[in-house]
Image (tube, rainbow, N blue to C red):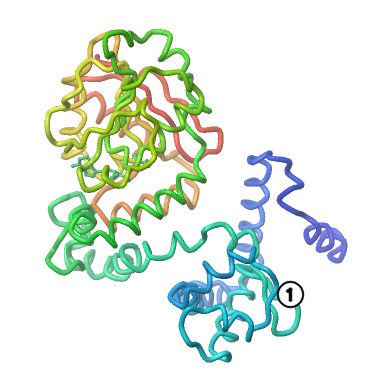
Amino acid sequence: MPNLTELLTTLDGVQAEDFKGNDLERLRLIDTVKKLLGRVETQVERMYDIVFAQPVIFAALETLLDLGLWQKWVEINGASKSVDELCSLCTQKCDPNLLRRLLRLLASVHVIAESHQDHYELTHISLDGMWQFLPSRTHHWGKAGVNLPLFLAKTGYKDPQDARNTNYMDVCPGNLDFFGKCIADPAYQDSFSDFMKGWARYKVPWPVFYDTGSLIDGANLSNGGVLCVDVGGHHGIDLTRLLDKHPDLPVGSLVLQDLPEVVKGANDLSPQIKVIPHDMFQPQPVKGSRAYYLHAVFHDWPDSVAVEILKNTAAAMIKGYSRLLIVEIVVPLTGASAIQSAMDVEMMALLSAYERTEAMWAKLISDAGLKIIKIWQDGRGNECLVEAELA
Ligand SMILES: C[S@@+](CC[C@H](N)C(=O)[O-])C[C@H]1O[C@@H](n2cnc3c(N)ncnc32)[C@H](O)[C@@H]1O
């Protein structure tokens, strides 16, 4: 064991900027620190956090959102303020001592920082739109997580794979499924969209790790030819990322598809992106596109349903020309990360669905009459792009 004081001084000195954008090194450090906690924390310390502290940490975050404090605090760049000053920033009357106790908790878990006695400031965790993540837990993940053990008991501990009988439906008034609830209640759609926007900021943009140039080189874009249809593309972030790399693509060569209630939230898109409301369980209306792109779509559906989406897509593809591009997690056989594993069990809790291993992808794709050409890694060990064509 190295000298503990020296070790702690070294660790205390580490800043995000030290990695100079080397994300893999940063992630290696985080992984090592988490493993270290797994070794040196006692069982009680770990359980206190998971069982006892996490619910009230989230409750504190949510209360500050309800008080309008996050937004107002960001407007003044998260400056160090006394509890009384922060109280006066709130959009609703709040007892200063209540706020003090919530802030103290959030500072103790490093979401904000205690600048000096009774004064707090925001950190990079809380400064940049953190609150956009919060309502999605209140609306979706929280309730689904609480109900999951009950649902699994009720369904005899079978691996949930029935999209018509999900844990989410079990807990949702009116038995609506996840996307049904989003459509029925715009606040639920918005919280889902806000989470997705935040999560997308974290992901490596697909044109960074996939050779989009080869797609364009072989594409026939004259006479209204389409380069890429983004099926279930939500508000179009992935097509926008493609345009960031290739700004000169012809108008209409990119097509964004999602449910009508979803694409109406796709604002400020470039004119090169044509928006077509479309239900992916209906035949694909855009025939012969160079690429059909689906990102985080299949993990929402068990194979029995996913294969229908794939078949609808395959029917529109031209053999030897069209490519299927699927961006998803490919679960490694060992060492799946916490992000990948949590996404897998979230899909169980929300949609009776799952993340897939390479073998599971190969089977699903082949069941729809396609074959994998290549699997491209995102370079961060999170997602891959599975490139396929008609078999
Ligand atoms: C997990 S989100 C992924 C969104 C986007 N591809 C991304 O990665 O940011 C799944 C998307 O599938 C859409 N979706 C669900 N059911 C659909 C359907 N029947 N037809 C078209 N899109 C659907 C949802 O509205 C949502 O935008």
Q: From the Cβ of disc 1, is ligand 1 less than 8 Å away?
A: no
| Residue plotted at (85% across, 58% down) | 2
| Residue plotted at (16% across, 25% down) | 285
Q: Nearer the viewer, residue 390 or 76?
A: 76
Image quadrant assignment for residue 77:
bottom right
Q: With respect to residue 90, does 331 lie above or below? A: above
Q: Nearer the viewer, residue 155 or 250?
A: 250
Residue type indicated by callout 1: Ser
| Residue plotted at (58% across, 91% down) | 97
Q: Nearer the viewer, residue 108 or 102?
A: 102
Image quadrant occupied by the C terminus: top left
Q: Specify whether 53 is left or right of 8.
A: left
Q: Residues within 10 Å of mark 1 (few under 14, many from 20)?
A: some
Q: With respect to residue 54, does 256 lie above or below? A: above
Image quadrant assignment for residue 39:
bottom right
Instruction: Return the x and y of residue 46 as percentages of the image width and height.
Output: 55, 72
- Ligand 1 position by quadrant: top left
Instruction: Return the x and y of residue 188 as percentages of the image width and height.
Output: 28, 61
| Circle 1: element type | strand
Instruction: Return the x and y of residue 359 as percentages of the image width and height.
Output: 33, 31
The residue at which mark 1 appears reads as: 115
- Looking at the rendered structure, the number of numbered marks drawn on it comes to 1
Q: Specify whether 33 is left or right of 190.
A: right
Instruction: Return the x and y of residue 202 as percentages of the image width and height.
Output: 52, 45
| Residue plotted at (45% across, 26% down) | 243
Q: With respect to residue 213, does 275 lie above or below? A: below
Image quadrant occupied by the N terminus: bottom right
Image quadrant assignment for residue 228:
top left
